[in-house]
Amino acid sequence: LRDPSPQFPNVLRRRRCRCQRRRRPTLTGRAWSTMDPNPTTRTFVEDLIRQAASFPPSDVTDAAVSELTSMFPPSGRRIGFGTAGLRSSMTPGPLGMNDLTVVQATQGLARYCSEHRHREGGEGR
């Protein structure tokens, strides 16, 4: 994306936020499944996406869409890191406890520690 012109500095930012709010669960599920290192949960999400996209619509399609929406909420919410760490049910998606959320949380914690070590002048290995 190019930088917006000086007279409209927030145009791209606003558009991006609106699109993120209206994300379709199947698109988010596809993105998730490409990053998921666990073949079992990856296949589960891909199967739900196939069922949700099936035509003609049926009860199975509605159930798949509902399950995808619960795992990948349009709001983009993620599992929270609280005083007890990460706690959630073992399900695919950003709200569940799974291999990818553990990898992402570990990367975030490592980045946080690295940034704070450098800010406070500490030396580490």
Image: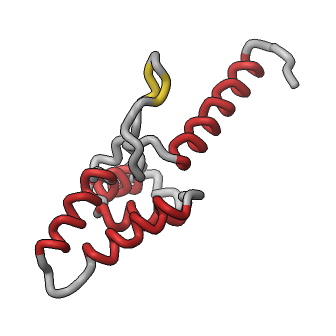
57 to 10, vertically: above or below: below
Quarter in which the C terminus is drawn = top right
112 to 2, vertically: above or below: above
Task: Name the quadrant containing residue 68.
Answer: bottom left
The residue at the far bottom in this view is: 56
125 to 69, vertically: above or below: above
In the rendered structure, the answer to whether residue 73 lies left or right of residue 102 reads: left
Task: Name the quadrant containing residue 77.
Answer: top left
Point 33% across, 77% down: residue: 50
In the rendered structure, the answer to whether residue 39 lies left or right of residue 96 reads: right
In the rendered structure, the answer to whether residue 60 lies left or right of residue 83 reads: left
Pick the front one: 92 or 123 = 92
Q: Position of residue 82 (x, y in %)?
A: 44, 21
Pick the front one: 29 or 50 = 50
Point 40% across, 65% down: residue: 44
112 to 33, vertically: above or below: above
Total number of numbered discs in the rendering? 0
